[in-house]
Amino acid sequence: MEEVGNARNISSKTQIEIDEGKEREAMQMVEAVLFVSGRFLGMKEMIMLSDLNPIIIREIIEKLQDEYEERNSALRIVEKNEMWKMDLKPEFSGIINKLATGSSEFTKAEQETLAIIAFKQPIKQSVIIKIRGNKGYDHIKKFSDQGLIKKKKQGHTHELSLSDEFYDYFNVEQKAKEKEEKETGEEEKEEGQEKTEEIKNEKNEEKKEN
């Protein structure tokens, strides 16, 4: 009887793992469809491209929205008139503009692959290939050869993340530094004005006492 109970527990656990695996695959599919399309998609298009039913699609979109919000992701899913689009939060738009227009060195397909790595890092190479197809291997090799990404062996695949060279190449760090220096300069200016005002007030007080 104990063996039967253990077998049932194992079977139940296996089924849960299978269901969770299927749910994760469905989430990745919806995520990939929204990312690659780059525009608002209605439910009919979502069904056609993902091969999922509308109830599951709505549930997945809600879960993705909650997931992005929970981990403070650079990505968001915008909804308008029963249509959905994956987009960047406004504060990250400058990076994608640089990716899209900054260099003719990358094709549009390469830019899209690099954008996925940039905003989903660390991400497994196998996931990139699933989303982008076999052409992703060539893209990843090019980025790695140029030192824009780091590859870390993880099981049968690699974990991909951005390198310091990426930030140097796209001037991301420099822009952040310039913004910080500007804010610091404004703060110092305000402090200087406050100090000057204090000195004036002290002199006025001295004149009154005299």
Image (cartoon, rainbow, N blue to C red):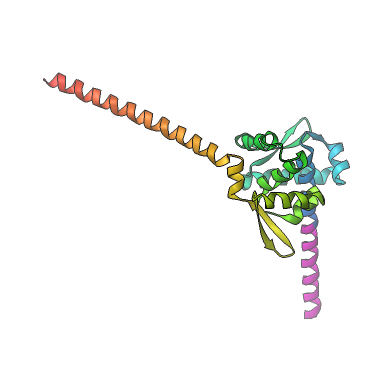
Q: Is residue 2 visible?
A: yes
Q: Quadrant of residue 95?
A: top right
Q: Position of residue 98 (x, y in %)?
A: 65, 36
Residue 134 colored in magenta in the image? no
> Which residue is rendered at x = 77% and y = 63% of the image?
17
> Which residue is rendered at x = 81% and y = 69% of the image?
11
Front residue of this view, candidates 163 and 115 = 163
**209 with respect to 169 (left or right):** left
In the rendered image of this protein, does residue 72 appear above or below residue 203? below
Q: Quadrant of residue 153?
A: bottom right
**168 with respect to 151 (left or right):** left
Query: Magenta span: helix, strand or loop, mainly?
Result: helix
Residue 15 colored in magenta in the image? yes
Front residue of this view, candidates 166 and 19 = 166
Q: Quadrant of the N terminus?
A: bottom right
Q: Quadrant of the C terminus?
A: top left
Magenta residue span? 1-21
Q: Is residue 122 visible?
A: no
Q: Position of residue 92 (x, y in %)?
A: 62, 37
Q: Residue furthest left?
A: 210
> Which residue is rendered at x = 77% and y = 30% of the image?
81
Q: Position of residue 128 (x, y in %)?
A: 75, 51
> Which residue is rendered at x = 54% and y = 36% of the image?
175
Q: Position of residue 113 (x, y in %)?
A: 74, 45
In the rendered image of this protein, does residue 191 appear above or below residue 134? above
